[in-house]
Structures are given as structure tokens and as C-alpha cells.
Image: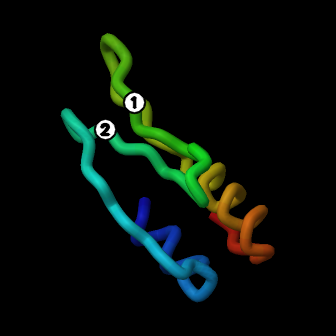
Amino acid sequence: MAGEALTRVGDHIDNFKLVPGPHGKFDVRIDGELVAEHRHEPDAHIFPDLQDLLQAINQRVGTTAKA
């Protein structure tokens, strides 16, 4: 997911940092604001949707990348 987002809007991203969390969980934050997360439910892993992530990036950098 990170690679796909960088491919689509990488020219507009000044800084990208991947910080792993426990049990493979991760958050996606833009300027400190949570925009997507990978979380664990009792019987499932819920991954962020790429289209939602790209929309959040687009809103902040003014691009029109599409999923």
C-alpha cells in the first residue's frame, strides 16, 4: 500500500516514515492526523483502503491521483 501511494503521489510527499507497531498493526498519519489504520478485530485484520488513503493525500497536497 505504501509503495502504491508513493508511486501515485510521491512527487508531492516530502517525508515518509514507516514505523511498525505490535502484531503488524500500523497507522497512516498525515501531518500528525490519523487518516488510515490497520487494526485487528477478533476474527479479522482490517486493512486501510488504498482509495481512501489516496483521497486523504490528495486533499492535503492538491493532486488527483486515483486508485
Q: CA distance from mark 2 to mark 1?
A: 6 Å
Is residue 54 found left or right of 24 in the rendered image? right
- Could you say whether the residue bearing mark 1 is in a helix, strand or loop? strand
Q: Quadrant of residue 47?
A: top left
Residue lying furthest left? 23
Is residue 47 found left or right of 20 in the rendered image? right
Q: Quadrant of residue 34?
A: top right
Residue lying furthest front? 32
The amino acid pointed to by label 2 is: Lys
Number of labels in the image equals 2
The amino acid pointed to by label 1 is: Arg
- 2 and 1 marks in contact (CB < 8 Å): yes
Q: Quadrant of residue 17?
A: bottom left
The numbered disc on residue 39 is 1
Q: Earlier in the sequence, mark 2 or mark 1?
A: 2
- Quadrant holding the C terminus: bottom right
Model colouring: rainbow
Looking at the image, which residue is at 39% across and 30% down? 39
Looking at the image, which residue is at 30% across and 55% down? 19
Looking at the image, which residue is at 69% across and 56% down? 56
Asked if residue 51 is positioned above or below residue 47 in the image, the reply reads below
Tell me residue 24's x, y (percent): 24, 40
Looking at the image, which residue is at 79% across and 74% down? 62
Is residue 65 found left or right of 37 in the rendered image? right
Asked if residue 57 is positioned above or below residue 33 in the image, the reply reads below
Query: Label 2 belongs to which residue?
Result: 25
- Could you say whether the residue bearing mark 2 is in a helix, strand or loop? loop
